[in-house]
């Protein structure tokens, strides 16, 4: 591997993992994250662009707003919690400890997910919103066999399979225009339609296309082979479009339905490469450990043509109830499966906001499902005149912080005129 290729691979990984909702869940929006992402009917102003553009057309959703910044980041896994780390860190592991650790990992392997999102200098005016945002998502899966070998040695696991390793990551920036229009306003019933359009600028993309390998150990020797095939890109562009429907009854009830990424096409066309890394270790023992020809590896990188990716269609429906100082909301989110990249699945979320003091809203939320995982969340805000500052904290994998298998935080700042 040349030094240039090493730098390129490292730069691509950094961009994909930490550069910029995770998926459609606008994890950089502190108010929505604090309310369990139950925001399809509750969103107003700029936030409508990420949940339901039709809300911009409602009479109570038209406002002048400037979002100075909004930022969120999170990391979670499917196996180990904070309490597990505290329990086993630095401890001499007994056989019961090893069995408990191994049983914590599902048969499909150890999964790691990371997201980050940012929005800056976005604004809305009446029934229009313009958003400038960026986000990144990484989803990696590692097989269970190597963990068992590390814990027990080759006494229980003489052969280790690597076929379950897979993953994908991407980072995008976006300039968006959303608008909503009221089509019916009769008595206490109001109905609005909305659409959102997003220009997508691809920053980085990486995908493990294939991983295979095996390691065999005996009392006196080790042999192994493996091959990993990856596809990467460092630039591209695309477009996506959303549609939404919103209904408002009186001053208290709002119903929302949206199709996010109803159309999307992302074309990766800059520095597109395929990398194939392979290695082989012939039977290695005390007599051959100094023989350089025993272990061989090969790293092949070659340019490929343009390729496309498409994230799944996301269907969101929600209901919100407002009265005085209280806001309650419920959402159902489903990401359709198909020939797409990104996560799929379903999540159900509920959220509550209560203004014990009018300028100090407190928020609580819960979400369960397999789209962006189960989590509990909480947060608060400061609303002084036109100035708003919101903060959110989410525990992934459990409703209790000590059993959480991941953490997410978000901070948002905006001004309403």
Image (spheres, grey):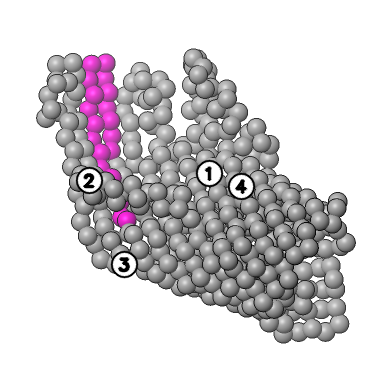
Residue for badge 4: 409
Spatial distance from mark 3 to mark 4, Cα to Cα?
33 Å
Give the mark nearest the N terminus, 3 or 2: 2
Of marks 1 and 2, which one's residue comes earlier in the chain? 2
For marks 2 and 4, give the CA distance.
36 Å
**92 on left or right of 231:** right
Residues at marks 4 and 1, CA–CA distance in whole angstroms: 10 Å
Residue to which mark 2 is pinned? 3
Determine whether label 3 and label 4 are within 8 Å by CB.
Answer: no
The percent position of residue 97, horizontal first and vertical second, equals: 52, 20
Instruction: Please tell me whether mark 2 or mark 4 is closer to you in this view.
Output: 2
Give the foreground label among 4 and 1. 4
Residue 268's place in the image compared with 363, above or below, is below
Image position, residue 10 (x, y; %) = 33, 47
Q: Residues within 10 Å of mark 2 (few under 14, many from 20)?
A: few
Dot 1, crowdedness within 10 Å: few (<14), some or many (≥20)?
some
Read off the magenta span.
213-232
**Quarter the N terminus occupies:** top left
Label 3 sits on residue = 269
């Amino acid at each position: 591997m040349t030094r240039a290729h090493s730098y390129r691979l490292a730069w691509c990984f950094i961009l994909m993992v930490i550069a910029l909702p995770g998926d459609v869940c606008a994890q950089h929006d502190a108010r929505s994250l604090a309310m369990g992402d139950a925001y399809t009917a509750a969103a107003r102003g700029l936030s409508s662009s990420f949940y339901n553009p039709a809300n911009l057309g409602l009479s109570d959703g038209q406002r002048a707003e400037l979002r100075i910044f909004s930022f969120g980041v999170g990391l979670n896994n499917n196996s180990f919690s904070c309490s597990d780390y505290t329990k086993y860190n630095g401890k001499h592991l007994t056989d019961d400890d090893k069995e408990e650790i191994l049983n914590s990992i599902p048969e499909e392997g150890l999964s790691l997910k990371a997201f980050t999102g940012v929005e800056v200098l976005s604004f809305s005016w009446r029934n229009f919103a313009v958003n400038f945002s960026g986000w990144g998502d990484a989803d990696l899966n590692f097989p269970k066999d190597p963990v068992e070998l590390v814990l027990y040695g080759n006494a229980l696991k003489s052969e280790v399979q690597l076929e379950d390793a897979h993953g994908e990551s991407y980072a995008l920036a976006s300039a968006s225009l959303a608008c909503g229009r009221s089509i019916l306003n009769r008595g206490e019933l109001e109905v609005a339609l909305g659409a959102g359009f997003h220009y997508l600028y691809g920053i980085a993309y990486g995908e493990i296309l294939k991983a295979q390998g095996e390691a065999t150990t005996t009392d006196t020797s080790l042999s192994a082979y493996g091959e990993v095939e990856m596809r990467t890109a460092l630039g591209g562009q695309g477009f996506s479009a959303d549609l939404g429907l919103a209904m408002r009854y009186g001053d208290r009830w709002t119903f929302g339905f949206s199709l996010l990424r109803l159309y999307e096409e992302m074309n990766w066309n800059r520095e597109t490469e395929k990398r194939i890394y392979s290695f082989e270790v012939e039977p290695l023992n005390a007599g051959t450990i100094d023989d350089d020809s025993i272990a061989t590896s090969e790293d092949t990188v070659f340019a490929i043509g343009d390729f496309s990716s498409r994230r799944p269609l996301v269907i969101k429906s929600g209901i919100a109830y407002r009265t005085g100082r209280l806001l309650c909301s419920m959402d159902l989110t489903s990401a359709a499966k198909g020939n797409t990249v990104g996560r799929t699945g379903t999540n159900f979320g509920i959220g509550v906001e209560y203004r014990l003091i009018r300028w100090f809203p407190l928020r609580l939320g819960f979400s369960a499902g397999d789209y962006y995982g189960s989590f509990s969340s909480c947060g608060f805000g400061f609303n002084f005149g036109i100035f708003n500052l919101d903060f959110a904290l989410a525990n992934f994998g459990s409703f209790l912080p000590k059993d959480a298998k991941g953490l997410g935080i978000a901070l948002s700042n905006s001004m309403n005129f």
